[in-house]
Image (cartoon, rainbow, N blue to C red):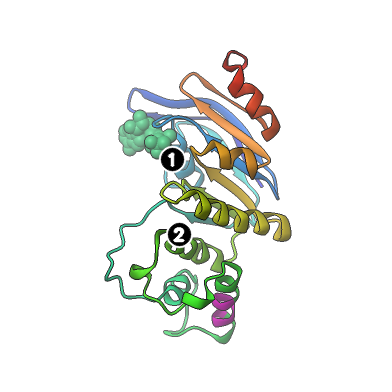
Amino acid sequence: MLSVNDLAINFGSTTVFDHLSFQVDQGDFLAVIGVNGVGKTTLIKTILGQLKPTAGTIETNPQLKIGYVPQFRNLDSEYPLTIADFVSLNFTGWKLPWLSKKERQRVQTVIKQLELTPIANRPLGRASGGEKQKAYLAQALVAEPNLLILDESTASLDPTTKQELLRVVKDLNQRLGLTIIFISHDMELVNEYPNKYLWLRSDGYSQGPIAELEMKLRGEADV
Ligand SMILES: Nc1ncnc2c1ncn2[C@@H]1O[C@H](COP(=O)(O)OP(=O)(O)OP(=O)(O)O)[C@@H](O)[C@H]1O
């Protein structure tokens, strides 16, 4: 689905990473971990096509359609759109000034998947942090991506809400085969939900099945 080959990114004379190679296969749930400033966001921006690699390539399946869920958007509490309207903003190729029946149905389906139906008509600005995060996820999903990138999307949530969000994501991953890239500092979630990891470090990186990660964290010398 996505193949990163010998990738390097420099900002001026600063190298964020180089010789980075990894692969994301259909149905993977990949955790991307690493300390602040190591280059996780830079990597995602490169995958999204916003940054040009200094060296190396990113090959993608022609059918690749990426959905991106950020950690946080600076939404005023007076933000007036309802959750349902906010979700529907992400339709591409919108030809009419109103939604087609099929699009309305898609919004309802996604809202139901995320258990947002009871609050679909609530202004997003009034929703809780966890509800907002679900709405961002729903907005990404409405366009039917086959790769979902969660960029520290659980960082500001309480432990129960984090688990709830990740359970929904895991369900989409297992039931629909949706491929996930999950950037996180939360090792409890990283150990529980993903099947693979990519650990970026200032002096290199490691990757593998998630079961290996705990062993590596215990004996960092082997990483
Ligand atoms: N446009 C830019 N110009 C110069 N340096 C940049 C630019 N963007 C990022 N950097 C630097 O590249 C490094 C990697 O930043 P990045 O945001 O990718 O890290 P991160 O792993 O996502 O960090 P965090 O966990 O704090 O979000 C940092 O040192 C950052 O200051």
What amino acid type should be assigned to the residue bearing mark 1? Thr
Image quarter of residue 144: bottom right
Q: Is residue 201 magenta?
A: no
What amino acid type should be assigned to the residue bearing mark 2? Gly
Q: Is residue 2 visible?
A: no
Cβ of disc 1 within 8 Å of ligand 1?
yes
Cβ of disc 2 within 8 Å of ligand 1?
no
Relative to 167, residue 183 above or below? above
| Label 2 sits on residue | 130
Q: Which residues are magenta?
A: 103-108
Circle 2 packing at 10 Å, graded few (<14), some (14-19), many (20+), is some
The image position of residue 107, as x and y in percent, is 54, 76
Q: Is residue 105 magenta?
A: yes
Q: Classify mark 2: helix, strand or loop.
A: helix
Q: Is residue 191 visible?
A: yes
Cβ atoms under marks 1 and 2 closer than 8 Å: no
Label 1 to label 2: alpha-carbon separation: 22 Å
The image position of residue 23, as x and y in percent, is 65, 38
Q: Classify mark 1: helix, strand or loop.
A: helix
| Label 1 sits on residue | 41
Residue at 41% of width from left, 49% of height from top? 156
Q: Is residue 30 left or right of residue 69?
A: right
Main secondary structure of the magenta stretch: helix
